Amino acid sequence: MKRGLKLKLTLSYVMVAAFLASSLLLVSNYFLEKQFQAYVEHQQEMKNDEIIDMVSRNFFDEDSPGNANLPGFMAFLKNLGDTLLEQGVMLMVYNSNGDMLFCTNTSAADACHHMREEHEERHSENCPEFNGSFTRKHFGIMRGGQAIGSVLLGYHGPFYYNESDRDFLRAFNRASLTVAVVFFFISIAIGLFMAGRITGPIRRVTERTRRIAEGEYSERVQLETGTAEIDDLASGVDHLAISLETQLALKKRMANAYSHEFRTPLAALQSNLEAMIDGLWAPTKERLESLLAEIFRLARMVSEIDNLVQARDPLAPSMTVKADLSEMTDRVLRSFETSIKSKGINLQYEHEPCEAYVDPDKFGQVIFNLVSNAVKYTNPGGNIKISTRNRGDMAVFSITDDGIGIPDDDIPHIFDYLYRADESRTRDSGGNGIGLSVVKAVVEAHGGNIGVKSIPGAGSSFTVEVARQPS
């Protein structure tokens, strides 16, 4: 059976609070009772001293004139013994020869027996560790430096509780129980409140996640609770929604772009081939070369899409070795010699040995795409400057042209899939919005970074940095 987080949190608060409250009450009860027992024992010792003093002052000694006669002394002992019996204390008095003069048990046997049982029961109730022993304390009666008698006080246990003592203990136990019950209900209230503070935002995030799963990406949680983990969770869900919304828009744009990019060459192939099949056009060399160019165009787009997928795939195999960026750049420039000469572009190439740990094939694609864009968007007779250099722990490749440039509003998006700063110019020049996406994906996969600066009508500059040592 599944239980909600709110219930679990509430129960945890209640259990912790109940444990702490009960522990505190038990400990305080234990120490208070110990202190109270010590207090009672001290009071009992003082009471014993008072009893002995009273007996000493009134003790009958036939050798010492001036004391009360024996009948008066026995009446005094009878009253004192009855008073002490009510308190659970047995009084026994002996003369100097050890003969018993008075014993509570003898003078009031039935009452003595009854009171002993009652006090034994009460003492056992208040002191569960009591083993039923009967305590006797012997005190000598001195006069003139000589022992004239003795007193024996007996009671159950190491001390005895009178009625007021037992009332105090009962009141304290009731108060402790009341405090424990109050703490229990307070802990429930606090648990419900705190659990609500935690589960409420989580419930909102959960509901928002459910709506995201249903395809609703526009709404945001925008939650600020002051709890770092919950706020991070809400922020993560918002970022997830934004990412999914962006991906959805990207998929739509990709579908539209792919359909257009593939439709044009496919339509040209279809119309030309149908015309040749129907005999309307002769399959001349020029027409066949035109069809082959369209096929090459389709193959190039498929290859670029495949490059992008591999660059973004974290599981794609990558062989990182020590490679010289300047040598890689030399090979790429040789493949563009014809294009650069045909457009009369002035190329300035500054380089030095610039080694870095990269995948030569993938990073060569980065340099190829950046050079291709520079050549493509530089006007005839324009200028391109390329350099490879070392800067601290980084190897740097940079390329600058004085071509058509990129509008400021488009710069943040030029690395997005299929994004085009100018639809008409890029399509006329053969761009499909994939090349720079591949560049950024490969550079980031190598732990590097790429920056761009551009002025519309004045050209663009791209700078790629990658670590010279393996990470």
Image (spheres, rainbow, N blue to C red):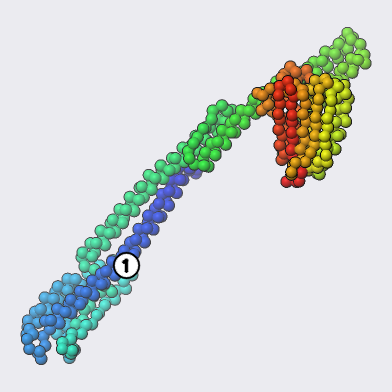
Between 116 and 140, the one nearer to me in the picture: 140
Residue plotted at (43% across, 45% down)? 10
Residue for point 43% across, 40% down: 196
40 left or right, relative to 438: left
Residue 118 pos. (x, y %): 22, 69
Q: What is the secondary structure assignment of the residue under circle 1? A: helix
* Amino acid type, label 1: Lys
Vertical placement of 318 versus 118: above or below? above
Nearest the camera: 36 or 470? 470
| Percent position of residue 78, x then y | 11, 78
Q: Is residue 409 visible?
A: yes
Above or below 17: residue 35? below
Locate residue 277, reporting x and y percent.
Answer: 88, 12
The answer to whether one can see residue 258 in this image is no
| Rendering quarter of residue 51 | bottom left
| The furthest residue to the top | 280
Q: Residue at x 18, y 89 (%)?
A: 145
Q: Which residue is mark 1?
A: 34
Q: Residues within 10 Å of mark 1 (few under 14, many from 20)?
A: few
Q: Residue at x 31, y 65 (%)?
A: 33
Instruction: Estimate the x, y position of residue 37 in percent, counting from the top left.
Output: 29, 68
Residue 414, picture quadrant? top right
